[in-house]
Image (spheres, helix red, strand yellow):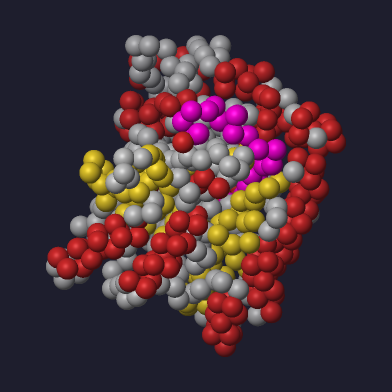
Amino acid sequence: MNDVPSTPSPAVIPRPKRGEGQWELGYREPLNANEQAKKDDDALNVRARIENIYSRRGFASIDPSDLRGRMRWWGLYTQRRPGFDGGKTATLEPWELDDEFFMMRVRSDGALLGVDQLRTLGEVSETYARGTADVTDRSNIQYHWIRIEDVPAIWERLESVGLETQEACGDSPRPFLGSPVAGIAKDELIDGSEALAEIKRRFIGNPDFSNLPRKFKTALTGHPSHDVAPEVNDVSFVGTVHPEHGPGFDLWVGGGLSTNPMLAQKLGVWIPLEEVADAWEGVASIFRDYGYRRLRSRARLKFLVADWGVETFREVLETRYLGRALVSNPSPEVPTRQGDHIGVHEQKDGRFYVGVAPVAGRVDGSTLVGLADVVERYGAAGARLTAYQKIVVLGVEPADVEALVADLDAIGLSARPSNWRRSTMACTGLEFCKLAIVETKARAADLVDVLEQRFPELDVPITVNVNGCPNACARTQVADIGLKGQLVMDSDGRQVEGFQVHLGGALGLGANFGRKLRAHKVTSTGLDDYITNVVGAFLADRRDGESFAA
Ligand code: SF4
């Protein structure tokens, strides 16, 4: 480490002309209802009310400020009432779409899920969630149809195997993305698993970080394929090798999508493994203390980073939070495309890992129980969830690989999927999400079927991300073909479900946002033919080796 720099002059902190609700600049009084609710009661406290009151007295007993706010800190959102189409999303308040059932997210945080955990996840789905279970692109398992009466029993089951829902939603440190192949990949630069576990141990459920301006997304990978979408997280640690100090992490801050997409910016510093948790604490503290709290639409770290610039951000991090200068480092090489780990790959210990693709992240309880059975049958190490709605089974003996692949295929988890199944993601959409305008999961599954028939062989990957509204939970802007749900006009002039298309987005080398062409709007029913035409035109015109985004 370099010498500790002197304390910065206060002038280093930019002061916006208009107060943005930044705590450290003296704005401690809440400027909106969300901030007021968080001030009224630490959202983590809602657990006791769920256990002692709401689960016993039923849905009607839930205090509205808990129902529409604090319950998120325990991974619970009300789901959309059936029968309300996408047109109602714009005309009704979200609470008018509340169903009496909940969506529940279970964090995995890049950790290895063993047989007991996978089986428990499946059994909870079958017992309490009508069999629903989605693998999200933040490597959660997401249930639906949860009754408030069952929540304490679900927590008991999950926590008995070390799983939790704490801060899976809300203005908090959301579930972490970790490399699915941490500790086992032959080409890994550094295994960051311990650092992620330490961040979780120290800061999840810690009241010092349970009232952030808004959500705070973390990604960490030591794999050269940057397999955790670091460009679109609030804070990312990306494996690199310093010429003098060796393996460590580059620190990126301020990425995020939604309606004002920004790519994370590199601070150009090298963080050793044992200091990752401290650096995370520093960045999260800057967000808590200086993040904008006046408008929800500007309350993400990306706006602060954009306004301050990376030099100021680094200076504040070093001087006010870490008390030392960080080691400068050129940023790591960026892969041409981020790794999804699908298929069969040899590990550094001679065993194998197998990446499999459910369709658009949709599995169910019986699939998860079946996955537990397969892992147990072959004595594999376990499974991890990925940032691409996929599953990777780790620690498979060479002699077992083909039998395991066949058994996974038999439960709908393909290790040798088509491009379309491999490269299509979808958010929750109209089926359960109150903000949705458009159906997504089933639409994506139908799209995959059609494209597999029309383009069975494809020698370049093409990614399709299907989103039910502008919030971009399935990363609209960084897919080759990104789809943002909205109402569009059909040929008869009627408003129907459809998509604004973004073309040519990418992560990895040349990371950028897809072009949003005004004319490229398509009805949901016309989507198959639209994508067929786009892909057909690309294949007809491309030069040798040209990718879709080029
Ligand atoms: Fe819901 Fe919109 Fe997010 Fe999809 S993108 S899950 S519709 S908020």
| Residue furthest out toward the bottom | 399
Residue 194 percent location from the top left of the image: 58, 54
**Quadrant, the C terminus:** bottom left
Q: Nearer the viewer, residue 228 or 169?
A: 169
Q: Nearer the viewer, residue 519 or 141?
A: 519
Q: Image check: 16 left or right of 124? A: left
> Residue 371, can we see it?
yes
Residue 158 percent location from the top left of the image: 74, 52
Q: Is residue 175 above or below residue 183?
A: above
Query: At 58% across and 45% down in the image, what residue appears?
Result: 432
Residue 109 percent location from the top left of the image: 58, 51
Q: Is residue 164 above or below residue 14?
A: below
> Residue 229, can we see it?
no
**Quadrant, the N terminus:** top left
Query: At 45% across and 76% down in the image, what residue appears?
Result: 416
Q: Is residue 30 above or below residue 103?
A: above
Q: Provide the residue span drawn in magenta.
A: 88-110
Query: At 79% across and 45% down in the image, what residue appears?
Result: 150
Q: Image check: 145 left or right of 331? A: right
Query: At 63% across and 61% down in the image, what residue appears?
Result: 364
Q: Image check: 514 left or right of 316? A: left
Instruction: Find out whether residue 105 is within the magenta segment.
Output: yes
